[in-house]
Image: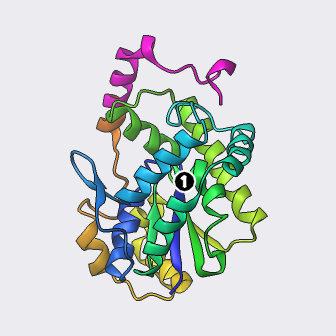
Amino acid sequence: MKNVIILTHGWTGSSVFAALLGKAGYWYGEDTFQKTDYDTYENLKLVELNNQLLSELGYTGNREHEILSSNVLDDLARSAEKIDLAPYKQFLENCQQHRPWVWKDPRLALTIRIWAKLLPLDDVTFMVLTRDDEQAWITSNLRRHIQSYAFTREYNAAITESIKKFLYEHRQEFIEFKFEDLQLTPEKTLEALNHFLYLRLTMDNLKSVYKFPLYKKTRGLKDKLTAWLIYLKNYRHRYDTHSAENKL
């Protein structure tokens, strides 16, 4: 079994996919990053190292509220030549002792090019996760990450494009899902995931990690209306998605 790295723009149900891979024996760390209402299944040490890496690289942007640009990624890659990668290599070696492992952290959209210098890429495969833009926008605003729908669409597209560019440049095999694939057509999605990773995950495995009703999207009309009210209430404090100075 190859190790798996999940690459995503966030709010894509990646925690469900990571938990599902845990059912197949993938290791997601000794400790995981816990939010107030759910486990992200993100290796806590990976999150800490990604934050440390971005600091060492001199990244001063706001990754959750600025559109990702290729210039920023190029600058980060160049800056990596000046820092000591030994702590990151040590972390990777520890992960290899627990293989197969799964990495998941939205910060990887910014740091994966640096990790690629250390990773045994022939022993890793990738999963790209996206989500219906409207569903992502609703979820973001419900969680008080205030942003316009136009920003959500542009933000998600920019990150997904940069992720695929990295994978194509490094000739890496990957599988792509929308969160809605897992929700609306779970059997078909499990079949594709099993085929790609040579697993035997079942619907019982999925139901044990996903507590919401299947065959329907998470966010309905009520959530959409609530998200609009939250957005409009915070309109003056929103991020202007079309302002050049807000872009990375």
Q: Is residue 221 above or below residue 186?
A: above
Q: Is residue 106 above or below residue 58?
A: below
Is residue 124 found left or right of 228 in the rendered image? right
Is residue 62 found left or right of 19 in the rendered image? right
Report x, y in % for residue 130: 53, 54
The residue that appears at 36% across and 82% down in the rendered structure is: 24
Of residue 174 and residue 184, the one placed in the foreground of this image is 174
Quadrant of residue 213 in the image? bottom left
For disc 1, the neighbor class at 10 Å (few under 14, some 14 to 19, many from 20) is many
Say which quadrant the C terminus sits in: top right
Query: What is the magenta segment's predominant secondary structure?
Result: helix
Of residue 237 and residue 99, the one placed in the foreground of this image is 99
Is residue 67 found left or right of 28 in the rendered image? right
Residue 234 visible? The answer is: yes
Report x, y in % for residue 73: 69, 44
The residue that appears at 50% across and 87% down in the rendered structure is: 1
Report x, y in % for residue 244: 69, 20
Report x, y in % for residue 200: 40, 89
Q: Secondary structure at mark 1?
A: helix
Of residue 130 and residue 172, the one placed in the foreground of this image is 172
Q: How many marks?
A: 1
Of residue 163 and residue 184, the one placed in the foreground of this image is 163
Residue topped by disc 1: 108
The residue that appears at 37% across and 53% down in the rendered structure is: 217
Provide the residue span drawn in magenta: 226-248
Q: Is residue 242 above or below residue 151?
A: above
Quadrant of residue 199 in the image? bottom left
The residue that appears at 67% across and 74% down in the rendered structure is: 173
Quadrant of residue 56 in the image? top right
Q: Amino acid at mark 1?
A: Leu
Q: Is residue 54 above or below residue 14?
A: above
